[in-house]
């Protein structure tokens, strides 16, 4: 039970600060207009909001001091208020399911046939998942996205065009951490994301590749994340992805004989 919950939570933790943006078919750099920083950020943020629902499945592999494993998974996101995650074992057996909305959460452990439910406030999520997450961070995380609303009216401390890439660098005025985004000029897809502390030590790195266009938004098939502070690495390979399906739904049902524990 603890391993299953820990596995689910590592997936969510590792995704929290990540960000992928929109694209068009690949173009030659010479044909593409070079955008100023403010227009670039507006484009990235606008693209983040285009996908209203998302369904994906694939393989996730996690390495950490306490856990090393891989599993199949399926994720369904429906904005603005639903995240549904399933983890599968051998032969497609459902090991665990989690449904989080802006109001409530429910976690079902298929092995022990036990469900846990309660209010999805920040305090409850932090207590259960051992992480400090707001609901919208979870929702954006599984799309490889991050909310750039707070950067719409902020200038980066550095803005460069290097070869075929934009490079945006921001500083957090509280922690003094540096965040750097490397964005492909041709399709406006972030291919690398890095966070460094004030001493220049790398804290987190994300690498994204093999993009698929969904509703004009570029989503990576492969995400490789490393968190040096917690000595964790995560690799996710999407095998299937669908965006903005009209008939998308969350089919989460608890067995009648399951033990229910109120949080």
Image (cartoon, helix red, strand yellow):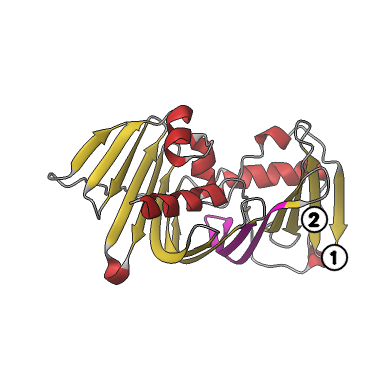
Q: Position of residue 71 (x, y in %)?
A: 41, 65
Q: Is residue 244 visible?
A: no
Q: Residue at x 82, y 54 (%)?
A: 34
Q: Up-down: is 202 above or below 260?
A: below
Most foreground residue, 65 or 11: 65
Measured along the vertical axis of the image, is residue 217 above or below residue 235?
above
The residue located at (76%, 32%) in the rendering is: 153
Q: Residue at x 78, y 34 (%)?
A: 154
Q: Quadrant of the C terminus?
A: top left
Label disc, if present, on residue 112 of the rendered structure: none
Nearest the viewer among 36 and 65 is 65
Q: Residue furthest left?
A: 257
Please tell me the numbered disc located at residue 163: 1
SS at badge 2:
strand
| Residue 35 position in % (x across, y down) | 80, 50
- Our reading of the magenta stretch's main secondary structure is strand
* Closest to the observer, 142 or 199: 199
Instruction: Determine the CA span between mark 2 and mark 1.
Output: 8 Å
| Quadrant housing residue 241 | bottom left
Q: Circle 1 sits in a helix, a strand or a loop, which is it?
A: loop
Near mark 2 (Cα within 10 A), the count class, few <14, some 14-19 or many ≥20, is: many
User: Bounds of the magenta span?
Assistant: 203-226
User: Local crowd at mark 1 within 10 Å, few (<14), some, or many (≥20)?
Assistant: few
Badge 2 is on which residue?
A: 166
Q: Residue at x 66, y 39 (%)?
A: 148
Give the percent coordinates (x, y) of residue 233.
59, 60
The residue nearer to you, when weighing 134 against 214, is 134
Q: Position of residue 95 (x, y in %)?
A: 30, 58
* In the image, residue 212 lies in the stretch drawn in magenta: yes
């Amino acid at each position: 039970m603890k391993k299953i919950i820990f596995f689910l939570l590592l997936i969510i933790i590792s995704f929290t600060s990540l960000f992928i943006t929109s694209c068009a078919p690949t173009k030659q750099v010479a044909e593409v207009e070079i955008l100023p920083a403010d227009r670039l950020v507006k484009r990235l943020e606008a693209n983040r909001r285009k996908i209203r629902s998302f369904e994906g499945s694939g393989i996730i592999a996690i390495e950490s001091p306490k856990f090393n494993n891989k599993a199949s998974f399926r994720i369904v996101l429906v904005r603005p208020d639903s995240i549904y995650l399933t983890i599968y074992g051998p032969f497609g057996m459902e090991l665990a399911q989690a449904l989080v909305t802006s109001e409530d959460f429910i976690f079902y452990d298929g092995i022990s046939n036990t469900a846990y439910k309660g209010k999805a406030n920040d305090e409850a999520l932090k207590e259960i998942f051992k992480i400090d997450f707001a609901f919208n961070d979870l929702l954006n995380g599984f799309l490889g996205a991050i909310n750039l609303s707070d950067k719409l009216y902020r200038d980066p401390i550095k803005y460069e065009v290097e070869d075929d890439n934009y490079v945006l660098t921001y500083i957090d005025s509280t922690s003094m951490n540096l965040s750097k985004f490397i964005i492909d000029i041709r399709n406006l897809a972030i291919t690398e994301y890095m966070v460094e502390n004030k001493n220049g030590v790398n804290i987190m790195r994300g690498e994204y590749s093999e993009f698929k266009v969904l509703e004009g938004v570029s989503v990576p098939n492969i995400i490789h994340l490393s968190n040096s502070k917690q000595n964790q690495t995560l690799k996710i390979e999407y095998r299937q992805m669908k965006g903005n399906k009209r008939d998308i739904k969350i089919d989460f049902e608890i067995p009648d004989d399951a033990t229910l524990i109120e949080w």
